[in-house]
Image (spheres, rainbow, N blue to C red):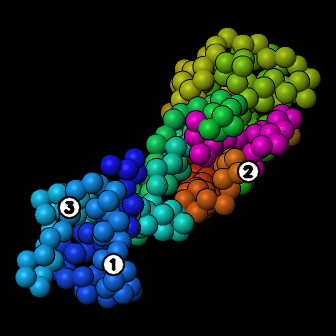
Amino acid sequence: MADVLDVRRLQMLAALRRLGTIAAVAAEMHLTPPAVSMQLAALEREVGLPLTERQGRRVVLTPAGQVLAQHGRDIVDLVSVAELEVEGLRHGASGTYRLAAFPTAARSYVTDTWRELQADRTTGLELRLTELEPDDAAAALAVGEVEVAVTHAYSNVPPVDRPSLTARPLTTEDVLLAVPASWEVARASGGRADLADQAGAPWVVPHADLACARMVRHACAAAGFRPTVVAEATDFTVQLALVAAGVAVALVPRLAASHVPDGVRLLDLRAPVTRHHFALVRRSSRNDAGIRRIVDALVGNASRTVAAITPDDAGAVLR
């Protein structure tokens, strides 16, 4: 037997079992009956077994022919499925895509995007999510562990150049000063907060190796002081809980302040700091239709999510 069977000949054999005559197979495949007969004879030589036999004026399949005809039918089905899936991928309607996103994005507009795509009856896109901080998400994207990385960059932190990646802006949010409501600054401030007034205050900050921690250090340095750190917490809900307890002050992005505990006041900064959100993809895959559909959905949901956080939602924001 040959090492590799001719797929088209197997398809002809499957068609013969289904249609019953050489003439019908030839008509369906736009060939002449002699051409079909020659191809089936060649398949018999490849296999080394008779695949058809004459019964009167009819050509019927032998047991070996029946077995190979079923494989031919399976191949036709698989090719059809492959064609449909390729067409779906071409139009961004199918495929499994891996995303990495930082926590506040993952629990808000990334989750909304997943829900939206899952509910869309016109698409079969599947998502897989890994929660990662921006630097780790970009690294995972660069080595092919994910297809999309949702990251952020603060306006007061120098951006990292990633030449192999391309970025699509998602949304921008402001950074707020969170202070205990009982403190004088919360009651007295009727305008924007001057960060220098918190030079002597205790601070809760993110862990030192995170971009959010660099943002805090740079903001305080620009105000002329180094913060007195009494607590480190990656989770902004923990930071806000400590602020509510009167333990410290903190700088939190607006998206992280969608649910603020009692006892916290949020103040706009006199020297504004903003956080810009991006969807990163590899340059080599930026034209993938599925990725484009996912990123388009992220853009819409990110903007709506940030815009929906009003001063009332975020506790008392003093301007």
- Distance from label 1 to label 3 (Cα)? 16 Å
Q: Residues within 10 Å of mark 2 (few under 14, many from 20)?
A: few
Of 291 and 277, nearer the camera is 291
Residue annotated with mark 3: 50
Q: Mark 1 belongs to which amino acid? A: Val
The reply to whether the magenta stretch includes residue 146 is yes
Q: Earlier in the sequence, mark 1 or mark 3?
A: 1
Of badges 1 and 3, the one in the foreground is 3
Mark 3 in CB contact with mark 2 (< 8 angstroms):
no
**SS of the residue under disc 3:** loop
Q: Which percent across, then down, holds residue 187? A: 68, 35
Q: Earlier in the sequence, mark 3 or mark 2?
A: 3
Residue annotated with mark 1: 36
Residue at 77% over, 43% down: 164
Magenta segment: 145-167
Question: Is residue 145 among the parts visible in the rendering?
Answer: yes
**SS of the residue under disc 1:** helix
Q: Earlier in the sequence, mark 2 or mark 1?
A: 1
Of badges 3 and 2, the one in the foreground is 3
Instruction: Decide: is 51 above or below 240.
Output: below
Q: Residues within 10 Å of mark 1 (few under 14, many from 20)?
A: many
Tell me where residue 134 sits by quadrant.
Answer: top right
Residue annotated with mark 2: 283
| 109 left or right, relative to 84 | right
Of 150 and 269, nearer the camera is 150
Please tell me the numbered disc located at residue 295: none
